[in-house]
Image: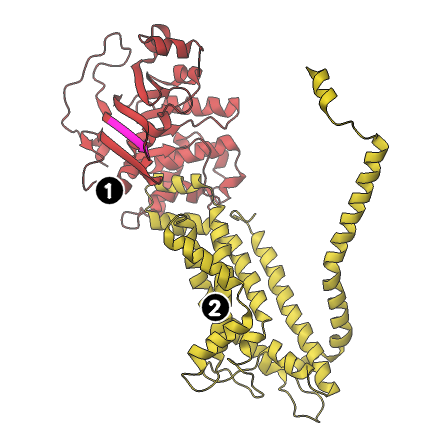
Chain colours: A red, B yellow
């Protein structure tokens, strides 16, 4: 897929005091992005880079636009009625909102996992993981190759050992945490270069949450991860960089360790010390 | 604070009074619940008593005998009903499911709002009017009655039932599921068919079976469309016999033998409807079920 093709990129910007590697080029660059619901600007003039193969957390109080920003990255925002997007989102330098870009192609290259587990209830575990592969008949893999990809994806999601003997059973029989890992496996199966996680542990118990967090940690280094969370401890645990949003605006974007120890903006400090939100 | 709330609250009735009201109301509702099922039980009992003795193999395999001869069956009417219901289903089901999916997916569109309203009007349309409509467009221009006209009248009755049921079922599919499919790179039409419609399928099948059971017993739309036929016919272009219609003809006749056949026919018709209803319950319990579970 295209994610292994080296593309010409602007020289990397060195982050002062960053614990990230200096050659971390942005995989996704957001430029002056506005996202609207009707006349309501949910995301306002956001410019941010998501470095390649790192985990970036987006935090902020409810309604700050963090989920909307995430949904702009794979063109899911526009699937809701009366929505509009202005600005640019560059994936490997290519503007995803340029004329002629097929949103379906974009979504195949950028995987997404939602707040609540969304296994397809009519499909078996195997069919769920393979769902993305089967979406297009023209480049559908052979049955043998599909089995390999399903196993590989389930292993990456840390679910293989739990479901290997019941791949043909209904996915709804799994626990909530297992279902969420199944959704991650399903998103990984099409080998996207970016995975978007929209509060993936919001509906899970602490143990399942821990497993998902470990998983996010493992994904790091292979894919670029953007995770939206309202849990600051989670952001601190799993991410390399953290972005703080408030009222639709990006307030601060810094390496996670720096963000939680020496925030530059007084609003960030107020939020992470628990004075609001 | 608590004290003030208490003081303002209405004086609670004594425990005994509350228990009494509880028992009385539970009793009343229980009686209503039993009364609700009583007509069906009474009807079944009566039908079994009157009709069961007339049901034998000949009833299913023989043709009606002329007046004066005893015996005979309703083979032509049973087959006729199956053909009519089959024709109606092949018209009502595809149109109804398609329209229902449209209504659910294009919720706010102006066309959807009018279609939804007209569909409800059609649903409340007296079935005799549906028969006149079918006669006007399918019988009069052709010049003779036909099974096709009867099937079309029944199919038209089925459309609004299936449409609204499909819409309701599709709406129960969570938006999150639709979004998950879109996020995987499913095109919109494929999301609608492979995920949304598939998830709602058990519910839609149930609704379709209920609609079939409903139209299988209709007589009025058939009176001047399929007309009835004393002879064996399986042709869509010819008049055809149907169980409810035959029951009507036999029941109003002066002959005891025909009355018995009418009872037996009623029992078979009820049995058919019951089988379909049970089938509908069974389908919703199937494995890997969707929202109908």
Q: Position of residue B36 (x, y in %)?
A: 72, 57
| Viewer-proximal residue among A115 and A25 | A115
Q: Quadrant of the N terminus of chain B?
A: top right
Q: Position of residue A33 (x, y in %)?
A: 25, 27
Q: Report whether mark 1 lies on the same chain as mark 2.
A: no
Which residue sits furthest top? A262
Going 73% across and 63% down the picture, which residue do you hit?
B39
Q: Of helix, strand and loop, which one carries label 2?
A: helix
Was residue B64 drawn as part of the magenta stretch in this picture? Answer: no
Which residue sits furthest bottom? B68
Nearest to viewer (mark 1 / mark 2): 2
Q: Pointer 2: what residue? A: B156
- The answer to whether residue B58 is seen in the rendering is no
| Viewer-proximal residue among B290 and B92 | B92
Point out which mark residue A102 bears.
Answer: 1
Q: Position of residue B149 (x, y in %)?
A: 47, 78
| Figure disc tally | 2
CA distance for labels 1 and 2: 41 Å
* Mark 2 surroundings within 10 Å by alpha-carbon count, few (fewer than 14), some (14 through 19), many (20 or more): many
* Mark 1 surroundings within 10 Å by alpha-carbon count, few (fewer than 14), some (14 through 19), many (20 or more): few
Going 41% across and 20% down the picture, which residue do you hit?
A61
* Chain of the residue under the numbered disc 1 shown in the image: A
Magenta segment: A33-37
* Chain of the residue under the numbered disc 2 shown in the image: B
Was residue A34 drawn as part of the magenta stretch in this picture? Answer: yes
């Amino acid at each position: 897929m295209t994610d292994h093709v080296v593309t010409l990129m602007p020289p990397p910007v060195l982050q002062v005091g960053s614990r990230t590697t200096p050659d971390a080029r942005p995989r996704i660059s957001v430029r002056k992005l506005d996202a609207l619901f009707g006349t309501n600007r949910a995301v306002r003039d956001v410019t941010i880079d998501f470095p390649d193969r790192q985990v970036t957390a987006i935090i902020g109080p409810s309604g700050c636009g963090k989920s909307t920003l995430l949904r702009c990255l794979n063109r899911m925002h526009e699937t809701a009625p009366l929505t509009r997007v202005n600005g640019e989102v560059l994936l490997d330098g290519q503007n995803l909102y340029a004329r002629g870009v097929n949103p379906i192609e974009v979504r195949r290259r950028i995987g997404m996992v939602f707040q609540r587990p969304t296994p397809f209830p009519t499909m078996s575990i195997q069919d769920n993981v393979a769902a993305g592969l089967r979406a297009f008949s023209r480049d559908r893999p052979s049955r043998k190759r599909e089995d390999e990809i399903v196993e590989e994806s389930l292993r990456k999601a840390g679910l293989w050992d739990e479901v290997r003997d019941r791949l043909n059973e209904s996915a709804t029989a799994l626990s909530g945490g297992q279902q969420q890992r199944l959704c991650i496996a399903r998103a990984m199966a099409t080998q996207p270069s970016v995975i978007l996680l929209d509060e993936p542990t919001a509906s899970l118990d602490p143990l399942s949450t821990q497993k998902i967090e470990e998983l996010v940690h493992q994904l790091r280094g292979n894919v670029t991860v953007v995770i939206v969370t309202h849990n600051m401890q989670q952001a601190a645990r799993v991410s390399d960089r953290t972005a703080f949003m408030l009222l639709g605006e990006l307030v601060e974007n810094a390496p996670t360790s720096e963000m939680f120890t020496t925030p530059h903006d007084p609003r960030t400090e107020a939020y992470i010390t628990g004075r609001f939100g | 604070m608590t004290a003030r709330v208490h003081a303002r609250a209405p004086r609670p009735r004594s425990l005994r009074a509350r228990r009494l009201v509880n028992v009385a109301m539970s009793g009343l509702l229980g009686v209503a619940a039993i009364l609700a099922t009583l007509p069906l039980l009474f009807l079944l009992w009566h039908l079994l008593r009157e009709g069961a003795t007339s049901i034998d193999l000949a009833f299913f395999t023989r043709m009606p005998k002329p007046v004066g001869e005893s015996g005979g069956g309703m083979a032509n009417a049973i087959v006729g009903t199956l053909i009519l219901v089959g024709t109606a289903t092949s018209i009502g089901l595809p149109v109804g499911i398609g329209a229902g999916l449209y209504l659910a997916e294009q919720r706010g569109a102006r066309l959807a709002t009018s279609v939804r309203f007209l569909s409800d009007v059609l649903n409340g349309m007296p079935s005799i009017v549906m028969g006149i409509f079918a006669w006007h467009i399918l019988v009069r221009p052709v010049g003779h009655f036909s099974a096709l006209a009867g099937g079309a009248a029944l199919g038209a009755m089925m459309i609004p039932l299936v449409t609204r049921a499909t819409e309701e079922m599709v709406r129960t599919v969570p938006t999150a599921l639709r979004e998950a499919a879109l996020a995987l790179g499913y095109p919109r039409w494929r999301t609608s068919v492979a995920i949304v419609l598939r998830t709602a399928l058990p519910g839609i099948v149930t609704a379709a079976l209920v609609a079939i059971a409903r139209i299988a017993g209709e007589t009025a739309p058939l009176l001047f469309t399929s007309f009835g036929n004393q002879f064996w016919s399986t042709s869509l272009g010819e008049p055809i016999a149907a169980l409810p219609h035959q029951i009507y003809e036999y029941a109003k006749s002066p002959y005891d033998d025909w009355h018995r056949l009418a009872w037996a026919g009623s029992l078979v018709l009820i049995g058919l409807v019951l089988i379909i209803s049970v089938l509908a319950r069974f389908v919703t319990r199937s494995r890997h079920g969707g929202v109908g579970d």
